[in-house]
Amino acid sequence: MDENAQWLSQEAFDRLTAELEHLKGPGRQEIVDRIASAREEGDLKENGGYHAAKEEQGKAEARIRYLEQLLENSYVGDAPKGDGSVAPGQLVKAKIGDREMEFLFGNREIAGSSDLSVYSEKSPLGEAINGAKPGDKVSYKAPNGTEIQVEVISAEPYTG
């Protein structure tokens, strides 16, 4: 497995695959139809509908590329059942600075529409806590240069 591969739950993989299929099929056609309709209205320089549809097309194509890359470079299954250490797919409870927080560790797409905060393993916090065990104290440098202390309280498989 590629070291850059990201874990996705089966639910997240299925949801993202369905989104990709929609974007590449009916979603793409809807945008093409809107562009064609707006083009028929005349002068493209002052046609807000045309420019909005073109912008939406660009965003949709970027999302398609992102989803294709993510789905191609991911592994799917149950959340990793580790030894309690922080790993992608874990629900982590940690004391960050003065606050206790609970968040999903991994790709934001895993959480779907839940209100759960998600921190990537590639973020400064994620790099600091990846592999840490409950009771471990680590620190990371925030983007503003502040050193932030983190104590891992728990890490359990995310069940979504």
Image: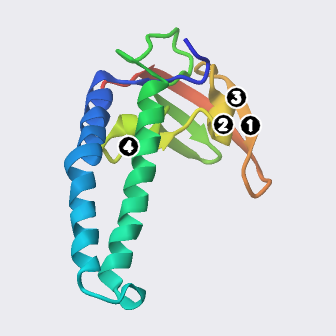
The quarter in which the N terminus is drawn is: top right
Does the rendering let one see residue 117?
A: no
Residue designated by label 1: 139
CA neighbours of label 2 inside 10 A, class few (<14), some (14 to 19), many (20+): many
Quarter assignment of residue 3:
top right
Residue designated by label 4: 116
* Amino acid at circle 4: Leu
> CB of mark 1 within 8 Å of CB of mark 2?
yes
Residue designated by label 3: 137
Q: Residue 52, relative to residue 12: is it above or below? A: below
* Amino acid at circle 1: Ser
Question: Total number of numbered labels?
Answer: 4
Q: Given this view, does label 3 or label 4 mark the residue nearer the observer? A: 4
> CB of mark 3 within 8 Å of CB of mark 2?
yes
> CB of mark 3 within 8 Å of CB of mark 1?
yes
* Amino acid at circle 3: Lys
